[in-house]
């Protein structure tokens, strides 16, 4: 159980990428006072949590309603995660890509809540790691708690963004984001292989 929780934590840490969110947060809040920055960080975290909890609760139900086998979604999700991971490793890192989105007036929603925290990879992870036919309610609850823990860490990082950014710098955040992409690529391959095995076992 402990190993599974650690694996879930690492998975969500990779797809949510709290460290990569720091330069994004700094870019979109640079003109605001500290009190406003705090409100934005809290609001973005709660919005992202609501979105991901929706996918935890309703993601599989939606798939069943449109008659898509979960293994097929797992394979497709793994492929998308793999491509997402490759973009983190070889393309623009998360800070590079999302700082370009920093012109929105509703910064807590876009780009902070979506796609920085509640990224496509995080949405897929929320569904894949809480499959009803694979995990018990207790296991799903523990996985969800790991997801919420990573979001809480993300919020703390945003609240301490200025101090952390001075410590790691933009290059440091970019490097860490690429390392997370490498971890995510291996998780994506595992998901694809698991989905193929489950599909042919139906």
Image (cartoon, grey):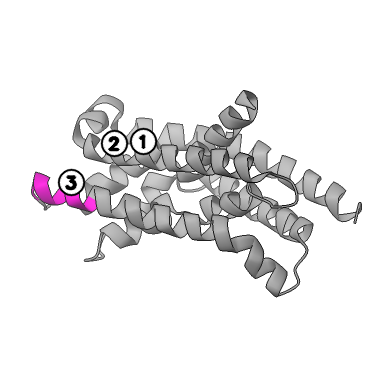
Q: CA distance from mark 1 to mark 3?
A: 14 Å
Residue 34 falls left or right of residue 68:
left
Q: Characterize the local packing of mark 3: few (<14), some (14-19) or many (20 or more) Cα atoms within 10 angstroms.
A: some
Quadrant where the N terminus sits is top right
Q: In this rendering, does residue 74 appear at all?
A: yes
Queried whether the magenta region covers residue 38, the answer comes back as yes
Which residue appears farthest toward the right when viewing the image? Answer: 201
Query: Where is 197 relative to 120, above or below?
Result: above
Residue 159: x %, y % from top left:
22, 39
Disc 3 secondary structure class: helix
Magenta stretch, residue numbers: 33-40
Residue that carries the numbered disc 1 in the rendered image: 153
Mark before the other along the chain sequence, 2 or 3: 3
Quarter where residue 158 is shown: top left
**Label 2: which residue?**
156
Q: Residue furthest bottom?
A: 66
The quadrant of the image that shows the C terminus is bottom right
Q: Which mark identifies residue 38?
A: 3
Marks 1 & 2, CB-CB < 8 Å contact: yes
First in residue order: circle 1 vs circle 3: 3
Q: Residue 122 at what x, y percent from top left?
A: 52, 50
| Residue displayed at 63% across by 69% down | 62
Chief secondary structure of the magenta portion = helix
Q: Are marks 1 and 3 in contact (CB under 8 Å)?
A: no
Question: Separation of disc 2 and disc 3 at Cα?
Answer: 10 Å
Determine if residue 99 is in view.
no
> 65 left or right of 202?
left
- Residue 109 is labelled as none
């Amino acid at each position: 159980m402990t190993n599974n929780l650690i694996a879930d934590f690492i998975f969500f840490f990779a797809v949510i990428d709290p460290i990569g969110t720091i330069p994004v947060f700094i870019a979109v809040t640079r003109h605001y006072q500290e009190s406003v920055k705090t409100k934005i960080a809290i609001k973005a975290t709660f919005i992202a949590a609501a979105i991901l909890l929706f996918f935890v609760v309703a993601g599989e139900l939606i798939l069943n309603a449109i008659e898509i086998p979960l293994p097929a979604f797992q394979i497709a999700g793994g492929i998308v995660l793999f491509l997402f991971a490759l973009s983190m490793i070889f393309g623009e890192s998360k800070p590079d890509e999302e700082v370009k989105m920093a012109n929105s007036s509703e910064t807590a929603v876009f780009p902070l809540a979506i796609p920085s925290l509640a990224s496509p990879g995080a949405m897929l992870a929320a569904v894949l790691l809480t499959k009803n036919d694979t995990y018990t309610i207790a296991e799903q609850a523990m996985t969800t708690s790991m997801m919420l823990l990573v979001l809480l860490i993300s919020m703390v990082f945003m609240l301490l963004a200025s101090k952390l950014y001075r410590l790691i710098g933009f290059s440091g955040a970019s490097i860490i984001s690429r390392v997370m992409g490498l971890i995510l690529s291996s998780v994506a391959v595992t998901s694809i292989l698991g989905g193929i095995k489950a599909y042919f076992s139906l």
